[in-house]
Amino acid sequence: MIHINADIGEIPRHIAVIMDGNGRWAKKRGWVRTRGHRTGADVVRAITTESAALGIERLTLYAFSSENWSRPEREVRFLMGLLTEYLDGELPTLQDNNIRMEAIGRLDRLPEQARALLDRNREATAGNTAMTLSLALSYGGRDEIVDACRALAQRVAAGELDPSEIDAAALDAHLYAPGSPDVDLVVRTAGEQRLSNFLPWEAVYAEYVSVAPLWPEFTVADFHAALGEYQSRDRRFGRVIEP
């Protein structure tokens, strides 16, 4: 088994996690899907605090995708209620661990109470420095790129920007979290191996690790194993490295 080595300087700056398998975990046990989501929320706390302790700079969690709005209305209502409950109760954990909270996505679609609590947490934790926890909420990677392109087009139309000045840096500056480091590692649970419209721009050079456990059964030890797999890889970024 590969183990994480925190002493060799290869801890990724930015980890993104696709938290898959909540519904399947509950269904396997004969329970309603929502029970899996609630159990999965407890795992979020464990992985978040462990990431901060390891010195990871940014952790982005795929909490609710733009496609998730098409799920059954009852499930969506439950998920929005669970999000509100999480945001309401998680502030002490964030403060105790010096974690800054952010969110990316089309946040205007979230319920008013969830948006208010999100704003409260972002403001309260703005000065925290150990790690940034970024929640991807009502998020779609294509939406993010489209929104960035629209913002650039508006600047061109207003005469503020010449089209010849648009490059990768200019587009990056108009993403939901401009200036954040590129994703080094994407972890997906439940054995799935799809990106699912998650951070396609930011994760263009990321390493991908798929793990078997469903999200509600994902442990800190599983997280360490994924980090160990990342550390074992040789990241070349298209270069040829001579021996």
Image (spheres, rainbow, N blue to C red):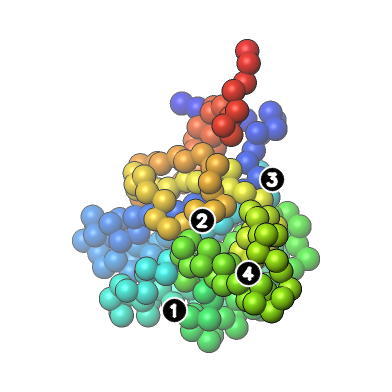
Q: Closer to the N terminus: mark 4 or mark 1?
A: 1
Q: Closer to the N terminus: mark 2 or mark 1?
A: 1
Left or right: residue 218 versus residue 26 is right
Task: Estimate the spatial distance between the alpha carbons at disc 4 and disc 2, rounded to whole Å.
Answer: 19 Å
Q: Closer to the N terminus: mark 2 or mark 3?
A: 3
In the rendering, at what x and y percent does residue 71 appear? 30, 72
Task: Estimate the spatial distance between the alpha carbons at disc 4 and disc 1, rounded to whole Å.
Answer: 35 Å
| Residue pointed to by mark 1 | 81
> How many residues crowd around disc 2 within 10 Å: few (fewer than 14), some, or many (20 or more)?
many
Farthest residue toward the right?
Answer: 127
In the rendering, at what x and y percent does residue 189 appear? 40, 48
**Kind of residue at disc 1:** Gly
**Kind of residue at disc 4:** Leu
In the rendering, at what x and y percent does residue 74 appear? 30, 79
In the rendering, at what x and y percent does residue 122 appear? 67, 72
**Kind of residue at disc 3:** Gly
User: Which residue lies at the image location 33% right of the left edge and 69% below the top edge?
Assistant: 34
| Residue pointed to by mark 2 | 199
Left or right: residue 35 versus residue 54 is left
User: Which residue lies at the image location 53% right of the left edge and 46% below the top edge?
Assistant: 204
Q: Report the quarter where the C terminus lies.
A: top right
| Residue pointed to by mark 4 | 152
Task: Estimate the spatial distance between the alpha carbons at disc 2 and disc 3, rounded to whole Å.
Answer: 22 Å
Residue 55: which numbered mark, if any? 3
